[in-house]
Image: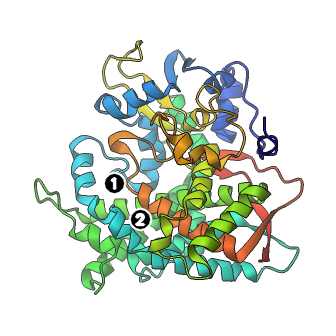
């Protein structure tokens, strides 16, 4: 083992039970942090059958089996009911994320053009502007004080969404918008427990009333924005204009205002949340790995110098992108992909009966001992072209896979590179001694209690 290998940073992990948890402890843990219910076997077995209340469910970790579930047999494995109950309540059931079958297919076809790489590169100036504004805000933090980097990144990526989707014309109360999203996410553990117990949707639980009020506010904001845009179209098209003008190339069908509202809310919530979390974890990991930090700074200086990060720099910031990819491996923004078997089916030689929940535990796959060398360590070089060659596509799933892969994946990756490079060049990020951030899944993988760090000018 080389000296470099012995110095790789290993972030603190979670304690996973050696055996599946008993019912009462399972439910208590599920409400607190669903990740902590996952048994240790998920990190070294190819599949794992579990059961609760007499109902079997299957966790699939083997990359070839993952590919069957998400790619080759995707039609047999629609999204599980928990997606509708947990996410549909937040963003609506008419969006590209929650729709199924023909409703999903035509929306996907109609929505794809604005997410092509060339179009996304046209949004880089807005991304860079938001990153520069964030750097300026962080420069104002008094020396020695801590700042919650997760909140700072949420604000930054929200600025990007407002500029790229709404040309800065959304007039959003950013703080209230973010707070309402967080209030809803805090209730997800309860929603998961109620779904597992197969209890009716009207069941009360802590925070439900506040979350419902927040959802009404978010949807009302989307409806208002769409009405304003229809009344006063912009001169330069943004992503909302693209969605309004979008039509299914096969049928000519356009989105209704309800479908537009659900999709806009989906892109706003998912688009800013997931990228912000990738940036949060990347900044913290890099702050704990001086050699990685040095290589990032050298690359930025060689590619961009002191110039504002622009579209011509993005593809050349290769190592910077690897850092973000590795952060999303260790802390995938979406740590679980829930599916359900629509019919009796065989996966990897395993017989799966109709209506069986089938889970793809992304967090466990990304740390799986049979898939990755030294899986717990922070090593951006594992995404170099040489080491990535031949890697099974079912081994790395930060944006899912197959026909339901995240439509905004390219947008998120470009955005993350632009913001990360801009912030790293401007500021030094320092971990708070003794702070051990704990990943907690609330639909997305957030650091429990935020990510306090110190910042200083370069």
Relative to 72, say whether 404 is above or below.
below
Residue nearest the observer in this picture, 112 or 161: 112
Residue at image location 58% in from the left, 53% down from the top: 322
Quadrant of res 71? top left
Question: Residue at left 73%, top 61%?
Answer: 293
**Residue closest to the eye, 399 or 188:** 399
x and y, in percent, of residue 426 in the image: 69, 77
| Label 1: which secondary element | loop
Q: Indicate left or right for 246 with 333 as reference.
A: left
Quadrant of residue 33 in the image?
A: top right
Residue 138 position, x and y percent, is 72, 78
Res. 261 in view: no
Q: Quadrant of the N terminus?
A: top right
| Residue 235 x, y percent position in the rendering | 28, 87
Tell me the residue at 42%/22% (across/down): 356
Which residue is identified by label 1? 95
Q: Is residue 286 above or below residue 371?
A: below
- Identify which residue, 199 or 128, lies in the foreground: 128
């Amino acid at each position: 083992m080389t000296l470099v290998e012995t110095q790789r940073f290993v972030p603190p992990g979670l304690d996973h039970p050696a055996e599946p948890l008993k019912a009462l402890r399972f439910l208590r843990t599920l409400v607190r942090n669903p990740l902590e219910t996952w048994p240790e076997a998920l990190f070294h077995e190819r599949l794992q059958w579990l059961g609760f209340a007499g109902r079997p469910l299957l966790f699939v970790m083997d990359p070839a089996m993952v590919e069957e579930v998400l790619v080759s047999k995707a039609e047999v494995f629609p999204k599980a009911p928990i997606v509708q109950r947990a996410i549909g309540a937040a963003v609506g059931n008419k969006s590209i994320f929650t729709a199924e079958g023909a409703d999903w297919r035509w929306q996907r076809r109609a929505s794809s053009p604005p997410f092509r790489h060339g179009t996304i590169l046209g949004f880089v100036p807005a991304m860079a502007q938001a990153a520069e504004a964030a750097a300026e805000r962080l420069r104002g933090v008094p020396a020695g004080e801590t700042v919650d980097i997760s909140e700072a990144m949420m604000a930054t990526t929200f600025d990007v969404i407002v500029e790229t989707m709404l040309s800065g014309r959304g007039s959003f109360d950013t703080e209230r918008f973010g707070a309402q999203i967080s209030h809803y996410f805090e209730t997800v553990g309860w929603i998961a427990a109620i779904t597992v117990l197969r209890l009716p949707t009207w069941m009360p639980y802590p925070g439900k009333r506040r979350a419902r009020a927040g959802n009404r506010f978010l949807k009302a904001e989307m409806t208002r924005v769409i009405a304003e845009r229809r009344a006063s179209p912009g001169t330069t098209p943004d992503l909302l204009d693209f969605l309004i003008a979008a039509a299914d190339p096969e049928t000519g069908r356009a989105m209704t205002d309800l479908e537009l509202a659900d999709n806009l809310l989906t892109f706003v919530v998912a688009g800013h949340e997931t990228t912000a979390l990738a940036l949060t974890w990347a900044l913290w990991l890099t702050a704990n790995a001086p050699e990685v930090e040095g290589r990032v700074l050298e690359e930025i200086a060689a590619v961009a110098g002191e110039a504002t990060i622009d579209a011509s720099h993005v593809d050349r910031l290769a190592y910077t992108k690897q850092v973000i990819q590795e952060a999303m491996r260790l802390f995938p923004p979406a740590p679980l992909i829930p599916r359900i078997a629509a019919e009796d089916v065989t996966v990897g030689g395993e017989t799966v009966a109709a209506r069986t929940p089938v889970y793809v535990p992304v967090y466990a796959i990304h740390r799986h001992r049979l898939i990755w060398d030294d899986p717990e360590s922070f090593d951006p070089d594992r995404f170099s072209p040489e080491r990535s060659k031949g890697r099974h596509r079912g081994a790395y799933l930060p944006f899912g896979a197959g026909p339901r892969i995240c439509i905004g994946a390219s947008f998120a990756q470009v955005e993350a590179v632009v913001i990360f490079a801009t912030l790293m060049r401007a500021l030094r990020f320092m971990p708070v001694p003794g702070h051990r951030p704990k990943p907690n899944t609330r639909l997305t993988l957030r650091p429990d209690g935020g990510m306090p760090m110190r910042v200083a000018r370069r």
